[in-house]
Amino acid sequence: MYTAALKQLETKIDTINEEFKTLHKYNPIEHVSSRIKSKQSISNKLKKKGLEPTHENIVKTINDIAGIRIICSFIPDIFKIADMIENMQGITILKKKDYVTNPKPNGYSSYHLIVSVPVSLSIGTIDVKVEIQIRTMAMDFWASLEHKINYKYEKQIPKSVKKELRDCAKMTQKLDKRMSHLGRNLMEQEEQTVKEITTEYTTVYTTAATALLSENASL
C-alpha cells in the first residue's frame, strides 16, 4: 500500500515537472527521489517508541515509511512547490513542519509535509501516509553529510563536530539566501509567464465551452 501511495504522488509530481519543462522558461524542480523505509529501520523506530512491531503500531505511529524528496533551486521554490502539493486533488495534508523558516537547533533545514493518499485495494480504499521533504540543493548537501556523520558516530557526535555542523549550516543558509537573491529576476519572469499562459488557457477553454453550449442549444 505504501508503494501504491508513492506511485500516485510521483505521477502527480512528474506531471508538474513535465509541465514546467515543456511550457515554462524556468523549472523550480531540480530532481525528485523516493524510498520505502527498510524493515530494520521500521523495527528500530518502533523499539525507540517502546512499541511492538505490529501492523497497527506501524500504521498509527510511523509517518515516514513512504517518503518523497523534492530538490529545488531556490528557497522561494520550496514554498511554491508546497502550495502546489497542498492544492492537489485527492491529497489531504495531515501535518506541516517548516524547518526552512525555523531550522532545527542542529542546523537542519527543510520543509516537511505529511500527506494522506487514498489507495484502492481489493478490500476497499484506505488512506496511506507519505512524508514529503522539499529542500534546496544546498540544504540537501548538508543533510546528507550530517546523516553520514551521525551514522559514523552512532548518533553520539562530539561537541566539536556538532559545532562545525552548525557553522556549516549557517553558511549553507547564507549561500541559499544569496543564490535566491540572484535568481529573483528569473523567478519573477517565470511568474509573469505563468500568468500569461493561465490567461491564455482560460480564454481558449472559455471560448470552446461557449461554442459547445451554443451548438448544443441549437440542436
Image (spheres, rainbow, N blue to C red):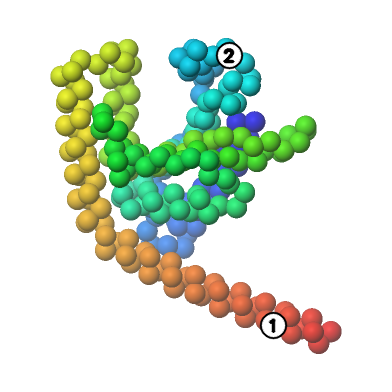
- Say left or right for 205 vs 16: right
Instruction: Please provide percent x and percent y for residue 144.
Output: 32, 29
* Mark drawn on residue 79: none
Instruction: Please provide percent x and percent y for residue 202.
Output: 55, 74
Q: Tell which of 142 and 93 is nearer to you.
A: 93
Q: Is residue 169 above or below residue 39?
A: below
Q: Is residue 185 above or below residue 5?
A: below
At label 2, the amino acid type is: Pro
- Say left or right for 15 vs 80: right
Q: Reading the chain from its start, which is encountered first: label 1 or label 2?
A: 2
Of tags 1 and 2, the one toward the viewer is: 2
* Mark drawn on residue 53: 2
Rendered residue at 38%/65% (across/down): 191
User: Is residue 83 in view from this perspective?
Assistant: yes
- The 10 Å Cα crowd at callout 2, few under 14, some 14 to 19, many 20 or more, is some
Q: Which residue is mark 1?
A: 211
Please identify the quarter of the rendering in which residue 205 is found: bottom right
User: Is residue 3 in view from this perspective?
Assistant: no
Quarter of the picture containing the C terminus is bottom right
